[in-house]
Image: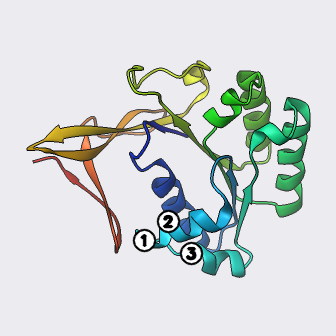
């Protein structure tokens, strides 16, 4: 699954909510944070009603925060695979995968190899991708859309002098999906998704 969008559209909040719900079900989730330190993610998510610390303490969630510039491509891929082997997660989040592009990696190669590695182990993978303003939302510079089963796009829409966060499902192979954009609200009590009025 790919969740793409510009800065501030809620990508990290959405994947953190996924991690929380997976852990509530007793599943294990591994979160590769490529830009933010672990404690910052925990603090920020608490402000939108997502408690990650509890699941870290329970051993259900592991947040591995490391900027990709610290290693080369092969070493980074090997490190990620080793952590997956050790932790044995049901789900893996990479937030954002675009940080690997900024580090100068041949990201498409890494993406294909890493997602194949996860698929062979029946591990769900959720990737976020930071879209640069002015770039079409249905484009990524690594051109991976054919490799994605489900693609969610987050955007902002100006309405009545304020910006609404918008969620839409671009595609989802093998299942029915709504073609209607929805408003996504980040509140102290969690994430709310509703119709745009």
Q: Quadrant of the N terminus?
A: top right
User: Which residue was labeled with disc 2?
Assistant: 44
Instruction: Pick whichever of labels 1 and 3 is earlier in the sequence.
Output: 3
Are the two marked residues, 1 and 2, in contact with CB atoms closer than 8 angstroms?
yes
What distance separates the C-alpha of mark 1 from that of mark 3?
19 Å
26 over 149 or under it: above or below = below
Q: Is residue 25 visible?
A: no
Residue 113 coordinates in the image, percent (x, y): 80, 30
User: Which residue was labeled with disc 3?
Assistant: 24
Q: Nearer the viewer, residue 140 or 195?
A: 140
User: Which residue was labeled with disc 1?
Assistant: 47
What distance separates the C-alpha of mark 2 from that of mark 3?
19 Å
Residue at 89%, 60% in the rendered image: 86
Residue at 47%, 57% in the rendered image: 13
Residue at 64%, 47% in the rendered image: 35
Q: Disc 2 on helix, strand or loop?
A: helix
């Amino acid at each position: 699954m790919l969740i793409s969008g510009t800065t501030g559209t809620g990508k990290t909040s959405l994947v953190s909510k996924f991690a929380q719900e997976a852990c509530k079900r007793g599943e294990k989730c591994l979160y590769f944070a490529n830009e933010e330190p672990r404690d910052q993610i925990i603090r920020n998510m608490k402000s939108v009603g997502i408690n990650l610390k509890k699941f870290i303490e329970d051993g259900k969630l592991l947040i591995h925060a490391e900027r990709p510039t610290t290693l080369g491509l092969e070493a980074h891929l090997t490190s990620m695979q080793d952590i997956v082997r050790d932790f044995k997660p049901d789900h893996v989040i990479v937030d954002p995968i675009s940080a690997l592009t900024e580090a100068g990696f041949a990201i498409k190669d890494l993406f294909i190899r890493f997602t194949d590695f996860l698929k062979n182990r029946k591990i769900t993978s959720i990737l976020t991708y930071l879209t640069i303003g002015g770039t079409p939302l249905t484009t990524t510079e690594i051109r991976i859309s054919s490799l994605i089963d489900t693609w969610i796009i987050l955007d902002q829409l100006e309405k009545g002098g304020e910006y609404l966060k918008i969620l839409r499902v671009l595609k989802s192979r093998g299942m029915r999906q709504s073609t209607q954009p929805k408003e996504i609200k980040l509140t102290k009590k969690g994430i709310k998704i509703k119709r745009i009025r």
